[in-house]
Amino acid sequence: METEGLPAAPGQYSQPGQPGPVLGLRSLSFAYQGLLEIPYEVILAQQHTLEVLDLSYNLLEESPALLGELEQLSTLILDCNIYSSHVKFPYMPSVTTVWINKNKISNLPIFVEEIRRKFPNIKILSMMNNEAAPSYFNGGSLPQYIDYRQYVISQIPSLTILDDTEVLGKERAQAKKTYRMQRTREGSKRRKELHR
């Protein structure tokens, strides 16, 4: 674990005869630790100051429910874990950046709805190299990639960057138009089926 550039010594946080946890940290990294569980005790000790939390390159799949207590968190990095489309996040209005690249996300509508509802102020979302995010990284075609971007942008209008690319006004307008038309067609189909 690293804390703002300082490498952590094993047992740094609760060894007898030593002071308690270092408080007031703005950034914590637990990357490459082989974690199966989120180390809430250490993380929540920073709940009033922590802005960046990196839990990447672990084996995490549990819903990070207690992270909602991090009042100042703006960046959450969950790359290279085993989170699925059904991960449940706490409501986190302070978070503006979520990186969840290379996980097990396969159902785009379910995942995007969770992101939209739980991170109302999100500006940057990166979910590259997930099955639900087709691109040249994972064998997706250009039309699949464009459709993926348009869908996500239409559902999360606050995004300024999706994956590694800025969301441009023209792209946002096309996404809104494409997915508004699709919803209208689906609504028409449902109405016709009801009247049969």
Image (cartoon, rainbow, N blue to C red):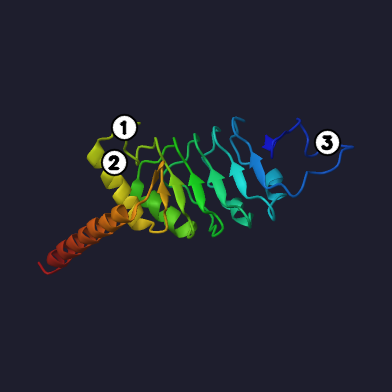
Residue placed under numbered mark 2 in the picture: 145
Residue at point 54%, 54% (across, down)? 95
Left or right: 59 with respect to 156? right
Between 159 and 46, the one lying in front of the other is: 159
Cα distance in 3D space between marks 1 and 3? 48 Å
> Please, what secondary structure does the residue beneath circle 2 have?
helix
Residue placed under numbered mark 1 in the picture: 136
Left or right: 171 with respect to 40? left
Left or right: 129 with respect to 19? left
* Percent x, y of residue 8: 73, 33
Amino acid type shown at disc 2: Tyr
Residue at point 65%, 41% (across, down)? 28
Cα distance in 3D space between marks 1 and 2? 8 Å
For the view shown, which residue lies furthest in the right direction? 17
Residue 15 numbered tag: 3
Count how many numbered circles sit on residues in the image: 3
